[in-house]
Image (cartoon, grey):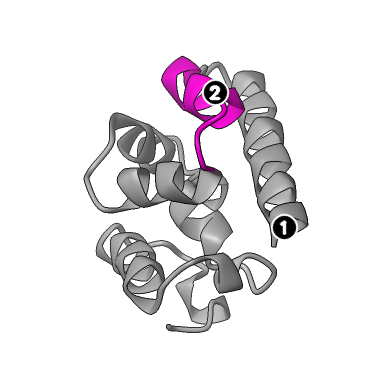
Amino acid sequence: MEQLKRELRERYISTYNECKKFGYKPRIFLDMTVSNRDIVETTRKLIHKPTTGFSTLHKKGRMDLSVEKIILEPKFRELFARADLQAAYNSLKERGYPQLDQIEAP
């Protein structure tokens, strides 16, 4: 489980670097990611309330880089409760994520 949490943290750092390529620098997200906080609890805070980061990624057409999308990947699902996964799925659905049909609903 700890290894998977490390992989999730690394994935978030790589997501930050990808965002920089199109001019978006989610600094608060990076700070939260590299802190010593529990990455799962940090993620829960992000997915259960609207964030400017999610809105920015939506506007840029890059919801594929959102925390919501990442935690729905099969590899990371086991870290989260069904309610967390459902919240993430619903957020993507509400914003019209174009590849939603490729994601297994919780």
Q: Position of residue 82 (x, y in %)?
A: 39, 78
- In-image side of 57 versus 20 (left or right): left
Quadrant in the picture for residue 74: bottom right
Q: Please tell me whether residue 104 is drawn above or below residue 41 in the rendered image.
A: below
Q: Pick the quarter of the image with the C terminus.
A: bottom left
- Depth check: 39 or 56 in front? 39
Q: Helix or strand or loop: what does disc 2 sit on?
A: helix
Q: Position of residue 72 (x, y in %)?
A: 53, 67
Magenta region, residue range: 26-38
Q: Position of residue 33 (x, y in %)?
A: 55, 31
**Residue at 38% of width from left, 43% of height from top?**
58
Mark 2, Cα crowd under 10 Å, few <14 / some 14-19 / many 20+, is some
Q: Please tell me whether residue 99 is drawn above or below residue 59 in the rendered image.
A: below
Q: Helix or strand or loop: what does disc 1 sit on?
A: helix
Mark 2 to mark 1: distance in Å?
Answer: 18 Å
Which badge, 2 or 1, comes first in the chain's sequence?
1
Quadrant in the picture for residue 16: top right
What number is the disc on residue 30? 2
| Residue 57 magenta | no
- In-image side of 59 versus 35 (left or right): left
Nearer the camera: disc 2 or disc 1: 1
Q: Please tell me whether residue 55 is drawn above or below residue 48 in the rendered image.
A: above
Q: Mainly helix, strand or loop, the magenta region?
A: helix
**Residue at 69% of width from left, 69% of height from top?**
75
Residue where numbered disc 1 is placed = 4
Query: Which three-letter amino acid code belongs to the residue tagged 2?
Result: Leu
Q: Pick the quarter of the image with the N terminus.
A: bottom right
